[in-house]
Image (cartoon, helix red, strand yellow):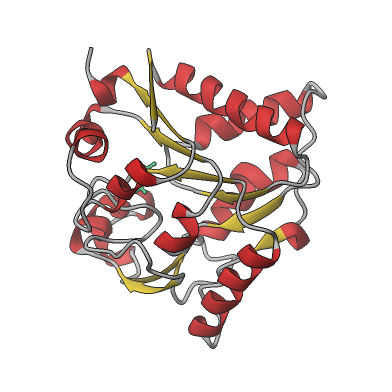
């Protein structure tokens, strides 16, 4: 696990974009699991700027949606797919057809979860997982406690996650209680992982991820054993 501490959020966004751009240049048709959430937004903006300057071609990527709320269609304002489309797919010119979705409104959620894991295998595995860190240590919606072998599946959100996500949608009552998430098994098998962490409110959990024991109670602590993990954190998240 490599920990890179940078000055601030802008530096984090530039460094994250540089890492992703290098991967895309080396493998234009790479398979990438992509998080929404606030932290990676600066990375995606930097990538979009590179594309505008014709320094990046992301059009051949295969994107795997990291997580989704249950029961929401893609046009619901709270849909994480909609957020990914606005922040990454459209600005980077990735067509919808190149996305392996986790459709929250699918009639058979278990079947779409199994199809997701099969698609990751059929793609030859995931080249890069781009992840944020939940205040409770979750990755995607792999809520604690979680097993490292957990597949892609339906999960109940913990009160901590409902509370933390309420800020996006107006209040806790607007946050759905169930979600679909890429499983820990898929995330931990990625050939490379970029975890982006910003802000003093992540300091305690980031320390446990990096220096604490590997435990189901801190899902991201399993990254200590994963391949080629880069943690990009700003000074606010790590301290001077
Ligand atoms: P954030 O979300 O990037 O908005 O902090 C991270 C998460 O909860 O997974």
Where residue 21 sits, quadrant-wise, is top right
Q: Which of 195 and 39 is in front in this view?
A: 195
Locate residue 51, reporting x and y percent.
76, 29
What residue sits 59% from the left and 27% below the top?
19
Q: Nearer the viewer, residue 67 or 195?
A: 195
Locate residue 111, reporting x and y percent.
55, 84
Would residue 49 be found to the left or right of residue 174 on screen? right
In the rendered view, tell whether residue 99 sits above or below residue 199.
below
What residue sits 25% from the left and 40% below the top?
209
Would residue 202 be found to the left or right of residue 79 on screen? left
What residue sits 23% from the left and 48% below the top?
214
Q: Nearer the viewer, residue 214 or 29?
A: 214
Locate residue 152, reporting x and y percent.
46, 70
Locate residue 162, reporting x and y percent.
26, 60
The quadrant of the image that shows the C terminus is top left
Would residue 176 be found to the left or right of residue 67 on screen? left
């Amino acid at each position: 696990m490599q920990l890179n501490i940078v000055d601030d959020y802008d530096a984090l966004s530039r460094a994250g974009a540089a890492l992703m751009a290098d991967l895309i240049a080396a493998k234009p048709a790479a398979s990438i699991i992509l998080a929404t959430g606030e932290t990676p937004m600066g990375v995606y903006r930097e990538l979009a700027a590179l594309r505008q300057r014709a320094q990046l071609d992301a059009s051949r990527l295969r994107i795997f949606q990291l997580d989704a709320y249950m029961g929401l269609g893609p046009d619901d304002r709270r849909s994480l797919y909609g957020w990914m489309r606005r922040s990454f797919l459209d600005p980077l010119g990735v067509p919808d057809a190149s996305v392996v979705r986790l459709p929250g409104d699918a009639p058979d959620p278990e079947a779409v979860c199994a199809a997701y894991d099969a698609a990751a295998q059929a793609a030859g595995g995931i080249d890069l997982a781009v992840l944020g860190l939940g205040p409770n240590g979750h990755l995607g919606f792999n809520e604690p406690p979680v097993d490292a072998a957990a597949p892609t599946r339906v999960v109940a959100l913990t009160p901590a996650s409902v509370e933390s996500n309420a800020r996006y949608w107006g209040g806790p009552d607007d946050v759905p209680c169930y979600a679909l998430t890429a499983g820990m098994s898929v995330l931990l098998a990625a050939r490379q992982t970029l975890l982006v962490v910003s802000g003093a409110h992540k300091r305690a959990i980031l320390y446990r991820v990096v220096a604490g024991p590997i435990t189901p109670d801190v899902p991201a602590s399993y990254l200590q054993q994963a391949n080629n993990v880069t943690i990009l954190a700003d000074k606010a998240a790590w301290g001077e």
